[in-house]
């Protein structure tokens, strides 16, 4: 009996040891596969981050270039507007001067016409008296 018991226990121990070795081997294989998968995942993530960084850098450079070009164009337009405004102000001043000159000339003509009309009326009145 003891022998059969020893055989049964001995066979169980051997089977358990064999199962334990198989489990250790499977565990080591899983750890190695997990490490490879993690390395692949980290490499892919690192590559994606680098791609996003390049994209952001390119976008920032384009933005800076576009911004400086736009700023230069706005400065150019501002200078043209300021020049145009000064020219318009000068033209308005010339028109105001011209307008006052025309007004003065018209008033002179009106006075001359009025004086001439008064003289003509006086001469006409004398002619009527003579007749």
Image (spheres, rainbow, N blue to C red):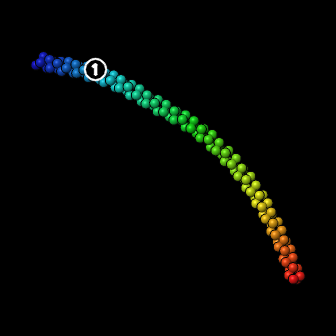
Residue 100 placed where, x, y %? 78, 61
Q: Quarter-wise, where is residue 131 in the image?
A: bottom right
Q: Confirm whether residue 42 shows in the render.
A: no
Q: Kindly state the secondary structure of the residue where label 1 is placed.
A: helix
At 71% from the left and 50% from the top, the residue drawn is 87
At 80% from the left and 63% from the top, the residue drawn is 105
Residue 4 placed where, x, y %? 12, 18
Q: Is residue 127 left or right of residue 15?
A: right
Residue 76 placed where, x, y %? 65, 42
Crowding at mark 1 (Cα within 10 Å: few <14, some 14-19, many 20+): few
Residue 97 placed where, x, y %? 78, 58
Q: Is residue 61 left or right of residue 108?
A: left
**Front residue of this view, candidates 18 and 116:** 116
**Front residue of this view, candidates 96 and 69:** 96
Farthest residue to the front: give it. 131
At 55% from the left and 34% from the top, the residue drawn is 61
Q: Quadrant of the N terminus?
A: top left
With respect to residue 94, does 117 lie above or below? below
Q: Quarter-wise, where is residue 64 in the image?
A: top right
* Residue position for label 1: 25
Q: Is residue 79 left or right of residue 49?
A: right
Q: Confirm whether residue 124 shows in the render.
A: yes
**Front residue of this view, candidates 49 and 118:** 118
At 14% from the left and 17% from the top, the residue drawn is 7
């Amino acid at each position: 009996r003891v022998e059969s018991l020893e055989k049964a226990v001995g066979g169980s121990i051997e089977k358990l040891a064999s199962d334990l070795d198989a489990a250790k081997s499977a565990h080591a294989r899983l750890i190695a596969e997990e490490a490879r998968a993690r390395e692949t995942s980290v490499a892919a993530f690192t590559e994606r981050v680098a791609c996003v960084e390049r994209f952001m850098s390119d976008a920032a450079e384009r933005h800076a270039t576009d911004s400086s070009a736009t700023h230069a164009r706005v400065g150019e337009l501002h200078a043209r507007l300021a020049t145009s405004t000064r020219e318009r102000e000068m033209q308005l001043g010339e028109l105001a001067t011209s307008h006052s000159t025309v007004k003065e000339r018209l008033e002179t003509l009106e006075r001359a016409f009025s004086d001439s009309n008064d003289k003509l009326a006086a001469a006409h009145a004398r002619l009527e008296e003579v007749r």
